[in-house]
Image (cartoon, rainbow, N blue to C red):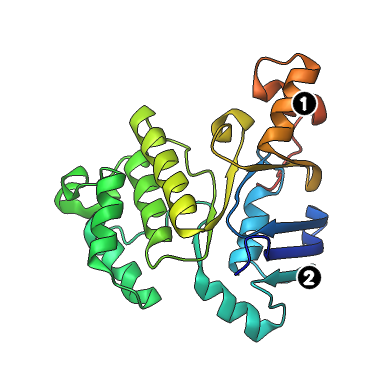
Amino acid sequence: MDSAETVISIRELTKRYGKRTALDKVSLELKKGRIYGLVGRDGSGKTTLLSLLAGFALRYEGTIELLGRSDRRGLRRARKSIGAFVDEPALYDELSIGDNLAVRGMLVGKNDKEQIKELRSSLRLRNSDVGKRGTRSATLGVKQLTGIAAAMVGDPDILLLDEPLNGLDVDGVEDTRGLLTRTNAEKGVTILATARTLTELYGLATDYIFIDEGKLVGQMTAAELDAELAERGLEEPEAYFDEIAPEKPRRKGAMR
């Protein structure tokens, strides 16, 4: 694939839950080999967008194109090349970390024991972290890291990660950032990761997308963001997002 090839294209994407609009005519193109940070507060539509891309949510208006395919059969095929961790880790509670990753490998048809070993080493995941009761007894951080590793099993072309740094300690954040950066640089994987704050993904993403109340309110490269921060005299990245999307009282029952 050409490095400038579009791997995800959405046009006028709208998703409603009853009378509530979670996504409102969102149009976006993601290029191969970039790390996109999708930043938005709770209720902004981040999880809804990832769910639609991963095929976990259906019945939408607009168009989704993945790896050049937009028809129903083509989207199903394209999603086999996507690793997704949306909303919360999809783990088998009774299984160990290693067994969870092995099952994921079998499901995607690429049970590469060496890759699983490398993922566990990179994220410092040990079966002793969960004990004999399986991942049900794991901390939020361990579950998050296991979910990230599971999404990466099989070397997908695209990674969709919903708030992957949430609940991680300092070491977990550092390990995850390092793994995602290496995976992107060495394998050309396109990554779309969400966060509630710009600070979480600052310095990791090559591109930033800002969403508020179901609508895109900005998109720029990391270099463009740094230039904006300097021009506006802002010392903290979060201050920029606060300027373009001032926080409003949250609507009752808002979607993520």
Q: In this image, 201 relative to 11: left or right? A: left
- Amino acid carrying label 1: it is Glu
Considering only order in the chain, which callout, 1 or 2, is on the residue closer to the N terminus? 2
| Residue where numbered disc 2 is placed | 63
| Mark number displayed over residue 109 | none
Q: CA distance from mark 2 to mark 1?
A: 32 Å
For residue 72, above or below residue 156: below
Q: Position of residue 131 (x, y in %)?
A: 16, 47
* Label 2: few (<14), some (14–19) or many (≥20) C-alpha neighbours in 10 Å: some
Please tell me which residue lies in front, 93 or 172.
Answer: 172
Determine whether label 2 and label 1 are within 8 Å by CB: no
Q: Nearer the viewer, mark 2 or mark 1?
A: 1
Q: Position of residue 201 (x, y in %)?
A: 56, 35
Q: Position of residue 54 (x, y in %)?
A: 58, 65
Q: In this image, 85 relative to 129: left or right? A: right
For residue 34, above or below residue 154: above
For residue 217, above or below residue 51: above
Residue at left offset 78%, top offset 48%: 214
- Amino acid carrying label 2: it is Thr
- The number of discs equals 2
Residue at left offset 74%, top offset 34%: 224
Q: Position of residue 37 (x, y in %)?
A: 62, 43
Q: In this image, 210 relative to 107: left or right? A: right
| Residue where numbered disc 1 is placed | 228
- Quarter-of-image position of residue 17: bottom right
- Quarter-of-image position of residue 254: top right
Q: Regarding mark 2 in the picture, which secondary structure is present there?
A: strand
Please tell me which residue lies in front, 3 or 59.
Answer: 3
